[in-house]
Amino acid sequence: MSHSLLTTLGVMGNPLWATLVIMLPLLAAALIVIVGHRSGPWFALAATVGVLVSLFKLAESVWINGPQEYPIGGWNAPLGIQWYADGLTVLMLLMMAIVGSLVTGYAVKSFRYSESIRFKTQKPPATPETTVKLLPRYENGVSHSTERLKYPLVSVADPPSTLPALVEESMDNRASSKSDYLLFWPLWLLLWSGLNGLLLSADLLNGYICLEIVTLATVPLLILKGGAMALGTGMRYLLIAWTASLFYLLGLVLLYRAFGTFDIQLLALEIGSGPTTWMAILLIIVGLLIKTSFFPFLFRAPAPVTALVAALVIKAPFYLLLRLWFEVFPTTVLPYISNILGALGALAIVWGGWQAVQQQRLTLLIAYGAVAQVGYLLLLFPLASGITDLWSLTAWQGGVYFAIGHAFAIAAMFLVADNIVQLLGTDHLDKLHGFGRIDPISLVTFALAGVSMMGGGLVASGLLLKAAWISHQWWWIGGIVTGGGLLAAAYVFKVLKPAFEKTISYQLAEPLPLSMKWIPLLLAIAAIVLGLVTTPLTLLEIGAPFEYEGQ
Amino acid sequence: MISNLIFSMAAMGLFTIGLYIVLIEAHLLRKIMALNIMGSSIFLLLIAIAARHSPPIDPLPHAIVLIGLVIMVSFTALALRLARRIDQETGQTCLPKDDWSI
């Protein structure tokens, strides 16, 4: 006996485009390994072009024919695995493709730049303020050394030979082999393929497998930099993601025990309330929430990797949660849990914003700000859980639209923060004076990305606020959204204020290559544009689990 | 049936024990083993599920166990290699302390 809303059954279409979307990055990754790692960026470019073309075709077919269903191999559920593409799927696939291609375009020049900064040695200035700090050696049979020579920032009047530099010798002393991060390319393609597979899957177990592929591809990406800190981040991410996956799997197994299927649409028909369902829902939500909220600290991983993880990898478990919440979970269960999720989201927004305002360092500020942004994603659930109410539809649209704009804004924010810190050699906010005169484009990018973080995209937060207002029970969420926006304004202006000043107090390390300046700007502009334009929302209506007027 | 019940309860007990160890223990190898225990407990539960309507045994959970085994082996291999690298770089077998420096 089903209590949940029945999903619109899809039309069986040509599976070519959906297949290409998943297989092209995978093939490209395999070809990179065969042909040689030097060809990485070229295969990535080819795969990007191919996937974008296929996505365009897939979006076209979804737009014309409605939600698409592809039984793979001709075998239907419950034994076969089905792929399902509707408006939400296509929008998220496009988000992954566009943000992914822009960030990897940034990565092409960024790796070389950051490594040249790291390993450039400068003659130490002969001033008494020079401080040289050496960390202890680790005796382990092999002599490792970490040496960190940190120069004070010198004034602009000094001759160029005393340019400040942040020099750090890596543990293995393999400076030149690291300067290209060649393994990034096959790993990114694998990650992308896993993300696409997850977005297209209509079978929860297939979703689990793709989630594991995503984790297995993310962990090596996180440790590309080498060194104890990066390894620690990678290990932490692996352990936490693995634990969360096991929660999710246990929840799936309990659902199978009770209802006998993994397919989303069949499960939506079969599911009913009961202690097994409660337990399974609890486990699944906990597992997916843990995965949605964990991203690495800036500078532990190369900047493009941090941007990709915080913008895209986080959306994968969020998408699964969306699908499960709105299409599978019985509606009798939802109101209780949605309160908890709303409270968690509100807590994240307020706590993250408050902590961010108090930071003196740019990297920590951005990190807490990103935590607050993830809280916005959770607010979608309480607002949209009254499935048959009008404001639920508004809230669902607003939440999904926010998730998509958030990817662009967070990617831009992480990339530009990395730019700023690479240029300055430090991330203390009081060294930011006059930064706008040194690199105005990065400053504009930061400002635009900050505006997106403040408003969450005007359309998206407008929809959320409207939904919160119409439904009289969720007015406090409207307050949280506004308060979160104010806090975001506070910490963004905290960075912008010194940067707009006229007096510069230091000199650059090395000017940024063009792509590193303009690509984050493109991302930030896209985030703003997504906050103003509503055409993608019409794509979202296809296959949405709500009653639209006139449908 | 009683063996079904025993397997299911044992699976849940193992899952909880594994979760406790992952959270409490600092040694990386123990965390990895605890995660393996958790994974194996889910497989045990799946085997118990396969026999829930006793005479025709459901083959689908067996296939899922195989999928899960592949995933678990991959994760364990990656985690063990990472733990080995951490041991080589820092001389310790616990998660490196992060001091938030850049």
Image: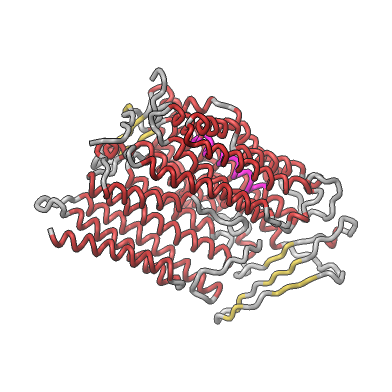
The rendered magenta stretch, by its main secondary structure, is classed as helix
Q: Residue furthest left?
A: B55
Q: Nearer the viewer, residue A424 or A400?
A: A400
Q: Quadrant of the N terminus of chain A?
A: top left
Q: Residue at x 37, y 69 (%)?
A: B33
With A75 as the anchor, is A85 left or right in this view? right
**Residue A449 in view:** yes
Q: Residue at x 26, y 62 (%)?
A: B11
Using the rendered view, name the quadrant where residue B3 is placed: bottom left
Rendered location of residue A547, percent (x, y): 39, 25
Q: Look at the image and give the residue range highlighted in magenta.
A: A399-416
Q: Quadrant of the C terminus of chain A?
A: top left
Q: Residue at x 39, y 54 (%)?
A: A245
Q: Nearer the viewer, residue A129 or A463?
A: A463
Q: Is residue A539 above or below residue A313?
A: above
Number of numbered callouts drawn:
0
Q: Nearer the viewer, residue A388 or A421?
A: A388
With A326 as the anchor, is A455 left or right in this view? right
- Judge whether residue A330 is colored magenta: no
